[in-house]
Image: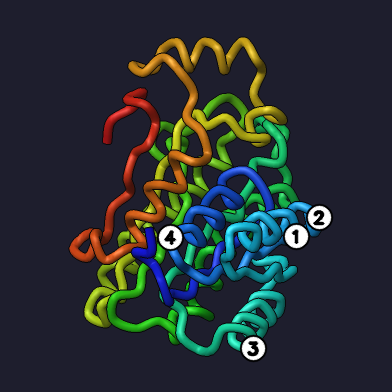
């Protein structure tokens, strides 16, 4: 129950869906959680309230994690509340924003997608890594799209997540001598607002039917794997991009 007791966790994009499930799961395991959000204050506060309802400790901190000054503020608020030692960092913030073909892409859309998905991962890790020591764990959210190029119109999203996957491997090598583990998850079709917004129902039905388990995944299943990677039970697991897609695609 309390395998993460006494640990401090920071979860970017923790206001809903996968980020919320991760925040709640880590808190149920005993961690104190910083729930980062940008647009959804109400959602972040609801996440915090859910954690507090079972006796957990959490705060909500607004920060645009594609903005370095905001990341620094997130770090400062974390230190102010929970001290200057961080045990778990989950880079969950990200988005697809729209499906666009090659000829529909422009520079502003490129910057938006790459900054939110990849730049955020790089510079959140840069800010928080000095607060982490032996036994700490960083978990990045990549995607099955990083493996297979994604669905139609998601080329930049897939590419940004491919960058997250590669950066994860590089940081596992760089931070391993300090005893910091770095892994990423590559979720497949997970029942979240992401797919409610950007994936047609007939496509979801077809993909779920093609999955060996014949269903979509759910956010709690992602959170369970994050909690394992954050724990000492995964003390020799680093540098991995772990597929969690019901068997739809293999690495």
Q: Which residue is mark 2?
A: 42
3 or 2: tag closer to the N-terminus: 2
Neighbor class of circle 2 (other Cα within 10 Å; few <14, some 14-19, many 20+) is few
Query: Which SS class for mark 1?
Result: helix
Q: Mark 4 or mark 3, which is nearer to you?
A: 4
In contact (CB < 8 Å): disc 1 and disc 4: no
Q: What residue do we see at 64% from left, 63% from top?
A: 52
Place of residue 144 in the rendered image (x, y in percent of width and height, measured from the top left): 43, 36
Pick the front one: 177 or 102 = 177
From the viewer's side, name the closer residue of 31 and 66.
Answer: 31
Residue shown at 41%/59% (left/top)? Answer: 139
What is the crowding at mark 3: few (fewer than 14 residues within 10 Å), some, or many (at least 20)? few
User: Distance from label 3 to label 2 (Cα)?
Assistant: 22 Å
Tag 3 residue? 80
Disc with the residue nearer the chain's start (1 vs 4): 4
Q: Quadrant of residue 148?
A: top left
Q: Is residue 251 left or right of residue 31?
A: left
Asked which secondary structure carries label 3, the reply is helix
- The residue that mark 4 highlights is 29
Q: Secondary structure at mark 4?
A: loop
Query: Which residue sits at x=50%, y=79%?
Result: 128
Pointer 1 residue: 45
Quadrant where the C terminus sits is top left
Q: Residue furthest front?
A: 54
Quadrant where the N terminus is found in the figure: bottom left
- Name the residue rendered at 27%, 82% in the picture: 178
């Amino acid at each position: 129950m309390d395998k993460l007791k006494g640990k401090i966790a920071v979860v970017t994009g923790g206001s809903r869906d996968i980020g919320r499930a991760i925040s709640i799961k880590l808190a149920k395991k005993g961690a104190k959680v910083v729930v980062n959000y940008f647009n959804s204050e109400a959602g972040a506060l609801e996440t915090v309230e859910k954690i507090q309802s079972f006796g957990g400790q959490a705060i909500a901190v607004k920060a645009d994690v594609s903005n370095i000054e905001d990341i620094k503020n997130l770090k400062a608020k974390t230190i102010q509340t929970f001290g200057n030692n961080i045990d778990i960092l989950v880079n969950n913030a990200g988005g697809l924003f729209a499906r666009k073909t090659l000829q529909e892409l422009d520079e502003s859309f490129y910057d938006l997608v790459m900054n939110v998905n990849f730049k955020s991962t790089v510079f959140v890790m840069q800010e928080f890594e000095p607060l982490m020591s032996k036994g700490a764990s960083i978990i990045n959210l990549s995607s099955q799209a990083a493996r297979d190029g994604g669905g139609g119109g998601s080329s930049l999203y897939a590419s940004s997540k491919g960058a997250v996957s590669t950066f994860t491997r590089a940081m596992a090598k760089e931070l391993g001598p300090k005893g910091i583990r770095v892994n990423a998850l590559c979720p497949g079709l997970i029942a979240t607002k992401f797919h409610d917004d950007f994936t047609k129902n007939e496509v979801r039905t077809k993909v779920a039917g093609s999955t060996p388990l014949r269903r979509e995944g759910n956010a709690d299943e992602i959170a369970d794997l994050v909690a394992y990677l954050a724990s000492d039970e995964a003390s020799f697991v680093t540098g991995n991009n772990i597929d969690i897609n019901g068997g739809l695609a293999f690495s």
